[in-house]
Image (cartoon, helix red, strand yellow):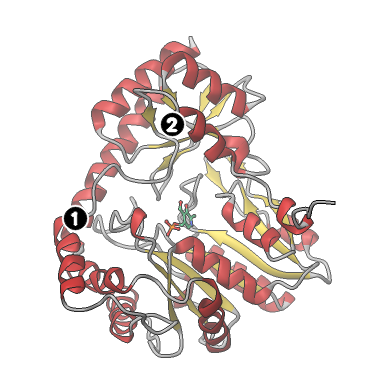
Amino acid sequence: MTPTLAASALRVPHSRIRELAEIAMSMDGVLKLYFGESNLPTPEYIKRAAQKAMADGYTFYTENAGLPSLRKSLARYYQELHGVELDPASEIVITASGVQALNVGIRCVIDPGDEGLVLTPAWPNGAANVAMANGTPIEVPHPLIGDRYQIDFAALEAAVTPRTRMLLYTSPSNPLGWVATVDEQRRLLEFARRHKLWLIADEVYERLNYTGAKPTTPVPTILKLATRDDAVIVVQSFSKMYCMTGWRLGWLVARRDLAARATQLNEFIVSHAPSFGQRAAETALLWGENTMCEMLVRLKENRDFCLAALAKMPGITVPKPDGAFYLFPKIAGATDSFDFCKRLLMETKVGLAPGVAFGAGGEGSVRICYAAERNILEEAMARLAMFLK
Ligand SMILES: Cc1ncc(COP(=O)(O)O)c(C=O)c1O
């Protein structure tokens, strides 16, 4: 008998965004709006900082929790941006991406057979990581009520069982663009405390906020409400805010015992994030505000352009998102969003992500990432309108 693959590995679902993307990648001239990344390259000053770091000898192993200097820079970032005090030595862990922060954080709280609540529609990697830790993701719908997505606290209460260990939410949300209010965060924290759950807040889009006083005003962080003894994990990343998706750099902030354990597990997963990238990330934190501001002004214009274009199309309902860089329109009559996206791709070369990829409540919608150049968005909206007709 040939050895078989572990059932636990086979249970992990594949990403339906990737499935669509793989078809698109085999074609020429596709307008790619399916992945969650900006078309902007990493700013030059960050690239130069990485080159300098390499020349300066940042080519060796670092601490499992990341360079102490980068953790100090992040503590300063939280202090300046949110007025939150963190101990860089014990509460911040640098990871090789946001998804790795999610992976190690979830690995620290889920035992085989445990359950993890995930507000959905959501980026699929959270639920997949619960499955990878041999747990069971339980999707709790995050419904659209009127023109705003609202947390269904009654559904959350009903989903708790003796095996429930965590609740994951994402604000700003991918794919909804929903932003948790301070009051919603307070209720989530109270819910987690009462049921003795870990509250995992994915805040990778925190700077992509269209409702702040300034373009770079962040959305509220859960760290502002939580005490340092609360069972809270914040997942973060340099990918979206600094156009560094390919660098694989992120971090997590957590209660000391979890941060220490995540640091220890990191040794066996990736050991640490790349040394020169970590050094360049310090430069990004120091000098990134101006380029981020320019990007946000452009993103807001893109959002408004796409919203206006979608409003003219038949059978489309789309709430106005407050954050991130996605629109998640519902398409009347589209009962199989993967099939819809595949046909759209084949017939018009517009690549969107199927709503079904985002779990319960996502079917019937598509996700449009509007962090592309304006001429690409214009062409994509024109072709989508034609297709829908
Ligand atoms: C909600 C959410 N969290 C985390 C990530 C992870 O980003 P990265 O692994 O590039 O840091 C993404 C990327 O799409 C995301 O959408």
For marks 2 and 1 on the same chain, the one whose residue lies earlier in the sequence: 2
Q: Which residue is mark 2?
A: 25
Type of amino acid under label 1: Pro
Q: Amino acid at mark 2?
A: Met
Residue drawn at 50 percent across, 36 percent down: 328
Snapshot quadrant of residue 230: bottom right
Identify which residue is drawn at 28% across, 42% down. 39
Which residue corresponds to mark 1? 43
Q: Secondary structure at mark 1?
A: loop
Measure how far apart labels 2 and 1 are at the Cα level. Answer: 26 Å
Tell me residue 136's x, y (percent).
Answer: 75, 59
The answer to whether residue 277 is above or below residue 338 is below
Packing grade of label 1 (10 A; few <14, some 14-19, many >=20) is: some
Answer whether residue 208 is visible to the viewer in this image. Answer: no
Q: Position of residue 134 (x, y in %)?
A: 74, 64
Q: Is residue 138 above or below residue 259?
A: above
